[in-house]
Image (cartoon, rainbow, N blue to C red):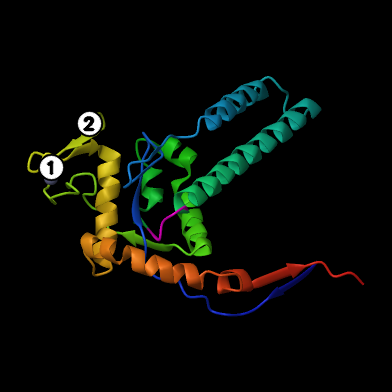
Amino acid sequence: MLTLECDVSVAAPPAFGHPIGIDLGLDKFAATSDGALIERPRFLNTLHRKLKLLQRRLRNKNIGSNNRHKLNCKIARLHQRISDTRKDWHFKLAHKLCDGIGMMFVEDIDFRVWAKGMFCKHTLDAGFGQFVSILQWVCWKRGVHFAKVDKDYTSQVCPQCDTHTGRKELKDRVHSCPECGYTTHRDVAAAQVIRNRGISGLGRSLDENACGDGETSAAVLVSRQPGDWRTRRVWRGLVTV
Ligand SMILES: [Zn+2]
């Protein structure tokens, strides 16, 4: 295997095409501004139950014994498997979210603060911090513009008319605006606020962006032929001697 890597600076993908906003949460793992809700993966629960069982067994083993050592190895392998499975799921989800879009916006959240709070175990389990960095990388790889936006009040503002609707309790699952009557799932509403903020951060309005959609995507199709920087940067191949 021969690998060539060139030292070139690769520009971030330009902002064009269909925009989505993504809201991350503990009830649903993620919600997009297009209305898709992504559930938290269930397989992690099963693996965690297994882990708990093994850890309980550890108490009955004598310190320094061979059996304890074997069980510890088993626990370490399970920990590794949990983290691998989660990472794999994050990558697959990130690729799925990148399908058919040109721009992606997420909240600029420091998840280390979340991890110290009330839902600490669940936050760590979901691995939001890792997911956001994977998302950023996959976006770059797929030529999707990625940006973080201000996180304040995303769940309290109406995406249609910008009215502050006040703080929602955890049990309130629906956003319903008293001003314009817009009603949708609360996480979807938050994702739409994030998308709107991302677009206005580019100095455009949502309508302007929608108008430019068709024109720019045609130009992009042309520029994404093989031999593009995304495919050219690293070259691998077998060389027979
Ligand atoms: Zn409204």
Task: Looking at the image, tell me whether mark 1 or mark 2 is earlier in sequence order.
Answer: 1
Residue at mark 2: 172
* Residue at image location 50% in from the left, 34% down from the top: 41
Classify residue 122 by image quadrant.
top left
Report the residue that reaches farthest toward the left.
Answer: 179
- Whether label 2 lies within 8 Å of ligand 1 gets the answer no
Identify which residue, 18 or 155, lies in the foreground: 18
Residue 74 location, x and y as percent?
A: 71, 32
Would you say residue 120 sits in the magenta stretch? no
Q: Amino acid at mark 2?
A: Asp
Residue 102 location, x and y as percent?
A: 40, 61
Magenta residues (range):
99-103
Identify which residue, 21 or 112, lies in the foreground: 21
How far apart marks 1 and 2 lie (CA) works out to: 12 Å
Q: Is residue 148 above or below residue 85?
A: below
Quarter of the image where ligand 1 sits: top left
Residue 12 located left or right of residue 150: right
- Whether label 1 lies within 8 Å of ligand 1 gets the answer yes
Sort mark 2 into few (<14), some (14-19) or many (20+) by Cα contacts within 10 Å.
Answer: few
Classify mark 1: helix, strand or loop. Answer: loop
Magenta stretch prevailing secondary structure: loop
Residue 109 located left or right of residue 50: left
Residue 25 located left or right of residue 10: left
- In which quadrant will I find the C terminus? bottom right
Residue at mark 1: 165
Q: Amino acid at mark 1?
A: Thr
Q: Is there CB contact under 8 Å for labels 1 and 2?
A: no
* Residue at image location 68% in from the left, 19% down from the top: 60
